[in-house]
Image (cartoon, helix red, strand yellow):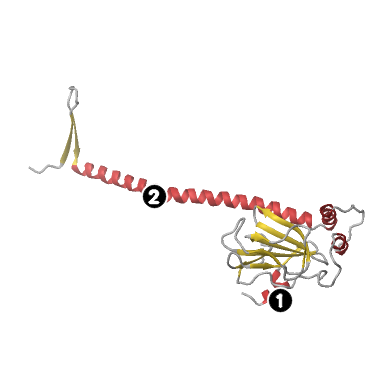
Amino acid sequence: MKTDKVTFIYVPLKGGEQRTLTLHHRLFTLIKVVLLICLLLLIISYGILIPRANKYTDYKDKINTYKAQETQLRQLLENVNEMKQFNTYMRELLGLELTSGSSSDYSALIEASGGQQDEQFLSGCPELAPAKGLITKKFMSGPRKHYGIDIGGKIGDPILASAAGLVVFAGWTPELGNMVVILHADDYITVYGHNDRLNVQERQRVKKGDLIALLGETGYSMGPHLHFEVWHHGLALDPQTVILEYKNKN
């Protein structure tokens, strides 16, 4: 005979009092539905929500690390591009005696470091595109600062010196990975970041068009590209307003 109740009987293995539990069929069905929903939520949590939460935490940690590194790099560039401090840094780097007067023209430092005073070496404004490819991220000022442009490419593509100058830094940084910084005449500085391999050393003189590195994705990078910056008198310039080849791109 059909009944609208469900009975559970508990029989102890070692004897004892037998117990029964009777539930209305609708209540039993409701309990099954609730348990099924809980099981599904548990599966979804472990299969989808928890991995996404872990991924979000990882991204948040990376963003915090990036912000801290960006602050350090910006402070470094601000300090380096204050003319007196940069002149002192250059003289210490080159092993020269410090002088009380600091000129904003670094031709004397270049000459003292062993550079030849020819027109090709002392060319000031960067004018050669250091890499071929599409501009994947543009120069941005304001709260969302991006002090250069990103040029996409393949790992191993050649990176060229945008102008003749003196390599003042060639090494690793957390944000830009393998980075090259070149000092040019007339207070110009160019920065080349995320390189796969460096082809120059500090205190090395380069001419416009010299191979200085190979394109890569080292440091904080989402894919192979060159991060290229141009600084003048301590201010970041939009490379698309400086490099003729980049002016009409994108």
Position of the C terminus, as image quadrant, is: bottom right
Q: Quadrant of residue 216?
A: bottom right
Q: Quadrant of residue 5?
A: top left
- State the residue lying farthest toward the right: 100
- State the residue lying farthest toward the bottom: 248
Residue shown at 26% from the left, 42% from the top: 31
Mark 1 to mark 2 CA distance (whole Å)? 52 Å
* Residue 133 coordinates in the image, percent (x, y): 61, 72
- State the residue lying farthest toward the left: 1
Give the left or right position of residue 158, taking residue 122 as reference: left
* Residue 142 coordinates in the image, percent (x, y): 68, 62
Amino acid under disc 1? Leu
Residue shown at 39% from the left, 47% from the top: 46
- Residue 7 visible in image: yes
- What is the secondary structure assignment of the residue under circle 1? helix
Name the residue beneath numbered marker 2. Answer: 47
Position of the N terminus, as image quadrant, is: top left
Residue shown at 73% from the left, 72% from the top: 242
In the foreground, 193 or 116: 116
- What is the secondary structure assignment of the residue under circle 2? helix
* Residue 112 coordinates in the image, percent (x, y): 87, 60
Q: Which comes before the other along the chain, label 1 or label 2?
A: 2
- Residue 145 visible in image: no
Residue 108 against residue 125 in the figure, above or below:
above
Amino acid under disc 2? Gly
In the foreground, 234 or 151: 151
Residue 19 against residue 123 in the figure, above or below:
above
Residue shown at 86% from the left, 60% from the top: 109
In the foreground, 210 or 138: 210
Name the residue beneath numbered marker 1. Answer: 244
